[in-house]
Image (cartoon, rainbow, N blue to C red):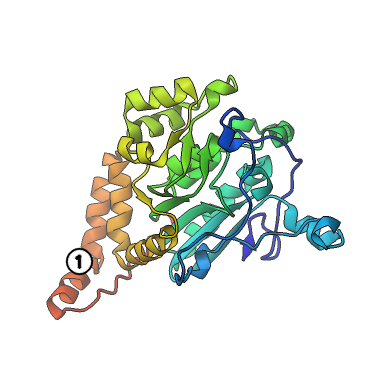
Amino acid sequence: MRRADGSGGHQHHTAEGGRAEVPAEPAALATPPVPGPYCVGRGTRVPPRLRAPPPVERGPEAGVAPGADTIRAMEPQLTHTVAEGVATVVIDHPAKRNAMTAAMWRALPPLLAELAADPSVRALVLTGAGATFCAGADISSLGASAEGGDAPQRLAVLAEEALAAFPRPTLAVVRGYCVGGGAQLAAACDLRFAEEGSRFGVTPAKLGIVYPASSTARLAALTGPATAKYLLFSGELIDAGRALRCGLVDEVLPAGELEARVAGFTRTLASRSPLTQAAAKEFTAGRTDRIAHWEDEARRSTEAAEGVAAFLERRTPRFTWVPAARE
């Protein structure tokens, strides 16, 4: 597993501890979820790319003498794997419900650029380590983000925009809390699958923050203006069922079934035509200025010929289209 700060394949970012954006008043939020692997039903095999990192024992109370390795393992980070055509990016800060530090916000755009440049990546999954997706921003770490001229909100917007612009299908896999900046990241993905019991919230009104215009537009496109206003005005959390009904998520799975569904669905995504998917991403984003480009690309490619031949021969198609270095 690799970490996203660019040094030697096993990298990490650190930041000072602090509060996440999860509101404190609901009783369910008083105790952080216990970090650990995804829960699955008895006998269900968890695909390696979706397994959360094992919980880290901390300090003498866990029977481990404190040392450099223990300290490094506790640091917030983004990790990623690539397997079977699917890149999985894990938000790994379980001690604070996977709140995003300034360093993590900065690390996401270059990590996504690296994965976008990998022709073996046909789809991307974004998820959280342990029992939650992302509780938002690690607010205390954002004070340091002004170093180098980065405003805290700008860091989040740049990360969100990089995720929205990722050229292959993206899927947010949500367990537990998806709040604040976590909801921004999930909304920037193409699709969102959630486990029953997940909770969602957009909380800038609790912090006196003006939500970014691009994030507001993206939220309203998913839920409709009325629900977007409800979430933004109140900062209240909604459950997975309501998130499904309002369009914030695409599927809700019972506990223990999420990983199997994600594994099967991402295999499906990786087997489909990347040309079709790339054009669809741009057209659904309103890029009518790219119609001629994609018509030309379709004429030059062999995707349609391969799809028809595979259908007639009753075999699985082998789609091989790869975008030009600069699409």
Where residue 10 sits: x, y (%)?
69, 64
Q: Can see residue 128?
A: yes
Q: Quadrant of residue 322?
A: bottom left
Residue name at image x 42 percent, y 57 percent: 258
Where residue 99 appears, as percent x and y from the top left, is: 62, 42
Depicted 88 relative to depicted 235: above or below = below
Look at the image and tell me in which quarter the N terminus lies. Answer: bottom right
- Badge 1 density bin: few <14, some 14–19, many ≥20, Cα 10 Å: some
Whole-percent x, y for residue 310 in the image: 19, 75
Residue at point 33%, 54% (across, down): 278
Residue 297 in which image quadrant: bottom left
Viewer-proximal residue among 302 and 219: 219
**What SS does tag 1 mark?**
helix
Horizontal side, residue 129 vs residue 12: left or right: left
Q: Is residue 327 visible in the rendered structure shown here?
A: no
Residue 269 against residue 226 in the figure, above or below: below
Q: Residue at x 83, y 56 (%)?
A: 61
Which sits in the foreground, 204 or 8? 204
Amino acid type for the residue under numbered disc 1: Ala
Which residue is denoted by mark 1 in the rendering?
Answer: 304
Relative to 250, 60 lies left or right: right
Work out whether residue 78 or residue 166 is closer to the camera in this orientation and state it. Answer: 78
